[in-house]
Image: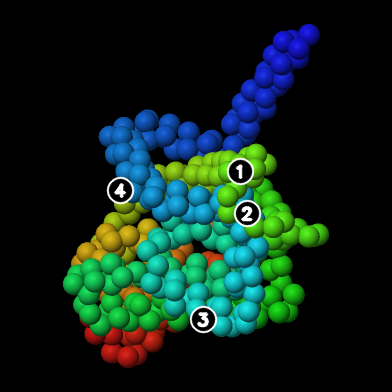
Amino acid sequence: MDTATNTLSYSSAVSRGARRLLTDSVLLAMLAMLAALALLDLPQLSRSLLFTAASLWEMLPFFALAIGIAALARATSADSLVAKAFSGSPVRATVLAAIVGAMSPFCSCGVIPLIAALLGAGVPLAPVMAFWIASPIMDPEMFVLTAAGIGFHFALAKTLAAMAMGLLAGLAVLAIQRSGGLADPLRAEVIGCCDSQCGGARPQVNWRFWQEPARIEAFRAEALAIGTFLGKWLTLAFFLESLMIAYVSSDWIAAYVGADNPFAIPLAAVVGAPSYLNGYAAIPLVSGLIEIGMTPGAAMAFITAGAVSSIPAAIAVWALVRKPVFVLYLLLGLAGAMLTGWIYQLAGGPV
């Protein structure tokens, strides 16, 4: 009787898992694109798969570290401590987040697991958004490479732009929240109510979580849930990046953002926003675009917009937060990129 019951339970679990796979929008999108490439451009299929695997492998240390931190925070109940650390002055926390974000080593996709962990731990959205916007634009290594590849003044201006865009985004979110908006930013299926957010008494922090079976299970469940959910979206994001690299021409972009176009900066931000320009490969690309006629202000708007809200990053953000937060994230990234581009152009824009 027990054997029959166990067999039935196993069969039901397998059936539920199969149904989830067959209705998974990410999996279906990947299968559709794989089939289209196999029919229309078979050589690109292998290149895209290799690119996706290499990108995931390159990001794996950051991804694993962020997931581990999130799981550790849940298992030890340290998420309440994280929330407490950001419970001071919202303006001070937002300013600090913008500065730290501009110096962090995360790209727009790599920062997603960390953002999920922060929001799940109850950290206010304003400093999280400031960090979220500023982080992918600049880091110490990128500063050195940008100064060498484009120019020191451009690298310095890009660093200041990262801080300013993060601060602008954080303060905008703070203003909206004080008027009653954006109360629940995370999608319900991403991270459930954590210990620091749920009502009732908070459990005591225990750093030796492995001594309690319930905490070990919490660690495993949190790591699996976040890793699986975000992993599949990032896989789709990197696959789309490979297609953009293969099929989007930088010459076409430069034709619309040259010095002769008075709308060069807004167009550069709009074109740059969905483009994947948050890696070190953006440096020689933007340098080449400047050489063939792109204005310095347009170049600044182009590279900052692409760093914040590229299509791969936007897909990962869409999977993480609710629609109002997603729309605000895109608007803040686009507006900040345009503003920094205009300021840099008016300041003389040396490269």
Residue drawn at (62%, 54%) of the image: 206
Q: Residue 144 vs residue 1: left or right?
A: left
Does residue 45 sit above or below 110 in this rendering?
above
- In primary-sequence order, the first of circles 2 and 3 is 3
On-image quarter of the C terminus: bottom left
Residue behind mark 2: 206
Q: Which mark is residue 95?
A: 3
Residue behind mark 1: 211
Does residue 172 sit above or below 35 in this rendering?
below
Residue behind mark 4: 246
Q: Amino acid at mark 1?
A: Gln
| Quarter of image, res 102 | bottom left
Q: Position of residue 231 (x, y in %)?
A: 49, 44
Q: Residue 280 vs residue 12: left or right?
A: left
The furthest residue to the bottom = 347
- In primary-sequence order, the first of circles 2 and 4 is 2
Viewer can see residue 239: yes
Judge by depth and name the residue closer to the eye, 254 or 111. Answer: 111
Label 2 and label 4: CA atoms lie apart by 50 Å
Label 2 and label 3: CA atoms lie apart by 31 Å
